[in-house]
Amino acid sequence: MRQIILLAVFSLAHSVLDFITGETKMTFNLEKAKDASYDEIREAVRVVNEWAQALLENDNVKPQMKVFVFGTAKALVKLMKANEQIPKSLTDLLARKSIVALSRTGSCAPDSSCGAVFDFSAIDGYGCWCNFAEDAGKGFGTPRNVIDEICRDLQLCYRCAKIDSYFEDNICHPGNQTYKVEMNHEVMSGNIYASCKASNQENDCQLHTCCCEIDFITKLVKLLWDGYQFEPEYKHDIFSDFSDQCFAGSEPHVIECCGEYPKRKPFFADGVFECCNDVTLFNTNKALCCEDGRVALDCYV
């Protein structure tokens, strides 16, 4: 059984305006969030925690999804408390719950679509790239939207976790991997790799899976904070011809990986691309890999 151990809650108070993943600073759009009183924040936190608890206790929720739920909930709670704001996704949720309560009809329970902070089941089998658990690493074609884009980044990272294990004793299967991570300021200040490394020093598969998934969580939290509106039409029971639209070439290629986790990605090594110092992917027809690690048109300039 897959188990991910989160050693500590998120700590975001140190940097309330920026959320950083890898080397890319992600800035939240605070103008889209609602300034809130202490009581409003407390109610929003209660709703988020109830949602997370309901899913964590639900045996029908995949273990991998429980990791995403837990991380998303902790990040949102810390951001709300630090900024004294409530993101639009949560103000909409609170409004739905209020309407249902006043009408005394229907249900807006934490594990229902009405009461969900984000419905992770809706992106399990979604677009061209959102596949999880035993399907981790699968995906092809052009992402349908921004959710599909962050799923693509996750799947490509997963693929490299597996490719990088080919010369190890055991092949890495990131969709069912156990790891530990302390969600502290180290992660939120931009160094996902260092935080994952600190708790997974003996196992590269654990380390790489940790990097891939924590990066995915941070990007998803940014979308929720910035008021992303989910597009259900790309769920596979609706997007029924996804296998045709998410087309992948059938020609065989030699595949290697380039970059640092969590941004490490596969590339066709039998083409025009090479990896400079195992960090930077470049087109050999347009640039050179310099001895100092730079990619440039001229290494002597």
Image (tube, grey):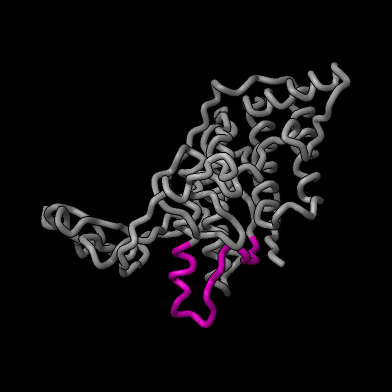
Q: Residue 271: x, y in percent?
A: 23, 63
Left or right side of 240 for 182: right
Quadrant that contains the N terminus: bottom right
Tell me if residue 99 can be seen.
yes
Q: Image quarter for residue 95?
A: top right
Q: Is residue 229 shown in magenta? A: no
- Up the image or down, 106 lies above or below 63; here it is above
Q: Residue 42: x, y in percent?
A: 78, 29
Q: Nearer the viewer, residue 148 or 233?
A: 233
- Which residue is drawn at the image coordinates 75% and 33% (left, top)? 115
Q: Is residue 165 shown in magenta? A: yes
- Which residue is drawn at the image coordinates 37% and 59% (left, top)? 259
Q: Nearer the viewer, residue 235 or 202?
A: 235
Outermost residue, right side: 104
Tell me if residue 10 can be seen.
no
- Which residue is drawn at the image coordinates 79% and 27% (left, top)? 43
- Which residue is drawn at the image coordinates 60% and 63% (left, top)? 134
Where does the magenta region start and end? 159-180
Left or right side of 281 for 266: right
